[in-house]
Image (cartoon, rainbow, N blue to C red):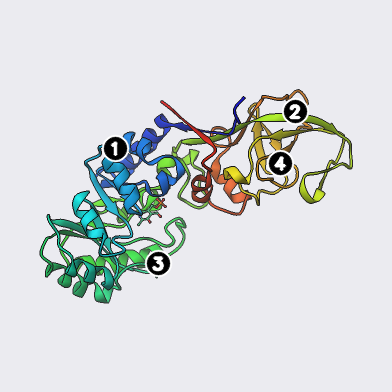
Amino acid sequence: MTRPARARINLQALRHNFSRVRQAAPDSRSMAIIKANAYGHGTVEVARNLPGAHAFGVACMEEAIALREAGFDRRVVLLEGLFAADDISLINAYRLDVVVHHDCQIALLEQGCLNRPLDIWLKIDTGMNRLGFTPAHAASARQRLAGITGIGEVRLMTHFACADDLSSDYTRLQLGRFGEVAAQLPGECSLANSAGVLGWPESHADWVRPGVMLYGSSPLLGRRAAELDLRPVMTLTTRLIAVNSRRQGDPVGYSGDWVCPADTNIGVAAIGYGDGYPRHAPSGMPVLVNGKRVPLAGRVSMDMICLDLGTQPQAQVGDEVILWGDGLPVDEVAALADTISYELFCGVGRRVQFDYLD
Ligand SMILES: Cc1ncc(COP(=O)(O)O)c(C=O)c1O
């Protein structure tokens, strides 16, 4: 038997989640955010199943080239823009859009040679305090770009820091700052991430940029994905490779800090932090065995986890174990492991086999 750790990718769920974007923001075009290997789901397979996306957002040249080499001719946007002068020939060759967030990138474009109209997404920092021109510098950056031969459309964009929290005023502050810049400068505008799409209709503007909602995770604090009609795309599964009876008081796993509270069966499932299951998942974390919740028992190892099968005494070697996905929301697992779904998705390791199901 090959090692049974697998990620099932439900392409129908992906397409459904994209339809939620269209439903929530029907008047906006959408840039599907598929950076980081489509949040760990597979760039090309995901892109193939988003025929309605008007553009794809990626973080680096390799991701953009993978899309072009797979035959996509839609708009592809490098979300961190160019990093070095060498990038310009690739941007030309692969017909990419770039985000411009810093004067040093404008300098690279001034020195480079563009062989076609290059569309720019000028990033305005409205409060994330990470990337972008301050609102006060937006006009001068725009003007400097206008002086470069070969510049095409210049769009304006910003990114929200707290849009997941519908009770926070910070998004309104960012919207206000962006509105002031957009009132002075021409061009299409893009603000909304997934939280903006579902929680802040006033942010939809010309282009929305959904990421995590496409993969079926809730972008809003305190709202479950199912309530938002989002469906899990990735289901991480494995199987039991051992079931052993243990006595009350037996310590289980590294450091022995989980001790059997009663005589029980301990199931060993073939998945661990080497596959991207979070090492900090605490004892008690639910996993599904044959569709029923059972708790993690003891520390996560590199290749294995132990499960207390006390409530599932009939469970046996070969039975399916679900770590997150169908029947067990990734957001619940992430919260218990003190992380976010994004990190869990991106962390799924190379040795996990991916199965794409339609
Ligand atoms: C610039 C930009 N836009 C949109 C997104 C999508 O965000 P989310 O996955 O929260 O929808 C990201 C992701 O981090 C991003 O960096």
Which residue is at a point 55% across and 40% down the rendered structure image? 329
Q: Quadrant of the N terminus?
A: top right
Cα–Cα span, label 4 and label 3:
37 Å
Whether label 4 touches label 1, CB < 8 Å: no
User: Which numbered disc flags the more N-terminal residue, 4 or 3?
Assistant: 3
- Marking on residue 70: 1
Asked whether, in this view, residue 70 is left or right of residue 356, the answer is: left
Q: Check residue 312 in the rendering and tell me which mark sits there, or answer none.
A: 2
Q: Please state which of residues 90 and 177 is positioned toward the viewer in this rendering.
A: 90
Q: What crowding class fits label 2: few (fewer than 14 Cα within 10 Å), some (14-19), or many (20 or more)?
A: some
Which residue is labeled 3 in the image? 128
| Spatial separation of the CA atoms under disc 2 and disc 1 | 46 Å
Q: Mark 2 or mark 3, which is nearer the start of the sequence?
A: 3
| Quadrant occupied by the C terminus | top left
Report the residue marked by disc 4: 296
Q: Which amino acid is tagged 3?
A: Met
Give the CA separation, mark 4 to mark 1.
41 Å
Q: Amino acid at mark 1?
A: Ala
Closest to the camera, between mark 2 and mark 1, is 1
Disc 2: residue Cβ within 8 A of ligand 1's nearest atom: no
Q: Is residue 169 above or below residue 32?
A: below
